[in-house]
Image (cartoon, rainbow, N blue to C red):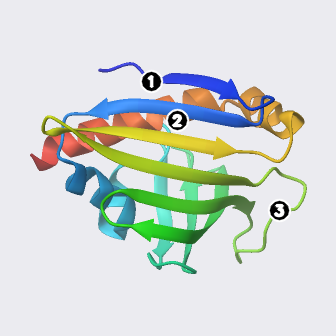
Amino acid sequence: MPKITYTRVEEDTDLIVERIFDAPRYLVFEAFSKEEHLVRWFGVEGWTLPVCNIDFRPGGVWHYCMQSPDGKIKSWGKAVFQEIVEPEQIVYVDYFSDEEGNIAEEMPAAQITMTFKEKEGKTLLVSRTHYDSPENLKKVIDMGVIAGITQTWNRLAQFLGELK
C-alpha cells in the first residue's frame, strides 16, 4: 500500500495528508459522496458505520456514527459541506457530535479541504485539515488521528480495488 505522508504547517494548525489511489479521480470522489460507498469503507479497521446520512451539496450535512467491533463504543460525527466542485474538491467543517447531531463544543472542530488530482489514471488525494489552534491539532494527534486516517484510507484503497 502507498504510504501516507503528513506534515504540520502554518504555525502547527494544519495537518496535510496525501496519498495516491490506484483508481480514477471520479471514482475516488464518488467514494466520498455516496452513502452506499461510505458505509463500506469509512472508519478505522474493524469498525462499522451503522448510521450514515449524507446530504451531499453545499450547505448539506453528513451525520454518521462509527461503531467499535463489539458494538460498545459509538463515535458520532457531523460534517457541514461548504463547497463541492465535482470531481475536484470537497470543503467541509468537521465536528464531533452526539446522536442527535448536536456539536460537541468541548472537542476541536476542523475545516477540511480535500483535493482530488488526476495522475496518469490514478488519483492524488490531498487532505488539508485546519484547526483554530496548535493545541487543538495536538489534541487530535494525541487522540490518534494519524493512525485513524491511515487505517481509513487503507480501507478506501481496498474498497476502490473491489470496484475496479
Which element carries disc 1, helix, strand or loop?
loop
> Which residue lies under the disc numbered 1?
4
Q: Nearer the viewer, residue 91 or 143?
A: 91
In three-dimensional space, the C-alpha distance between marks 1 and 2, rounded to whole angstroms, equals: 9 Å
> Which residue lies under the disc numbered 3?
104
Q: Residue at x 66, y 49 (%)?
A: 73
In three-dimensional space, the C-alpha distance between marks 2 and 3, rounded to whole angstroms, equals: 21 Å
Whether residue 112 sits left or right of residue 156 in the image: it is right
Q: From the top left corner, tell me how far across and down residue 118 is, in percent.
A: 23, 43
Q: From the top left corner, tell me how far across and down residue 117 is, in percent.
A: 31, 44
Badge 2 crowding class, 10 Å Cα cut-off, few under 14, some 14 to 19, many 20 or more, is some
Numbered disc in front, either 1 or 2: 1
Q: Residue at x 54, y 60 (%)?
A: 91
> Which residue lies under the disc numbered 2?
149
Up the image or down, 118 lies above or below 77; here it is above
- Identify the mark nearer the N-term, 1 or 3: 1
Q: Are marks 1 and 2 in contact (CB under 8 Å)?
A: yes
Q: Residue at x 56, y 45 (%)?
A: 68
In three-dimensional space, the C-alpha distance between marks 1 and 3, rounded to whole angstroms, equals: 28 Å
Whether residue 3 sits left or right of residue 120 in the image: it is right
Q: Residue at x 44, y 31 (%)?
A: 18
Whether residue 73 sits left or right of residue 3 in the image: it is right
The quarter of the image holding the N terminus is: top left
Q: From the top left corner, tell me how far across and down residue 3 is, in percent.
A: 39, 19
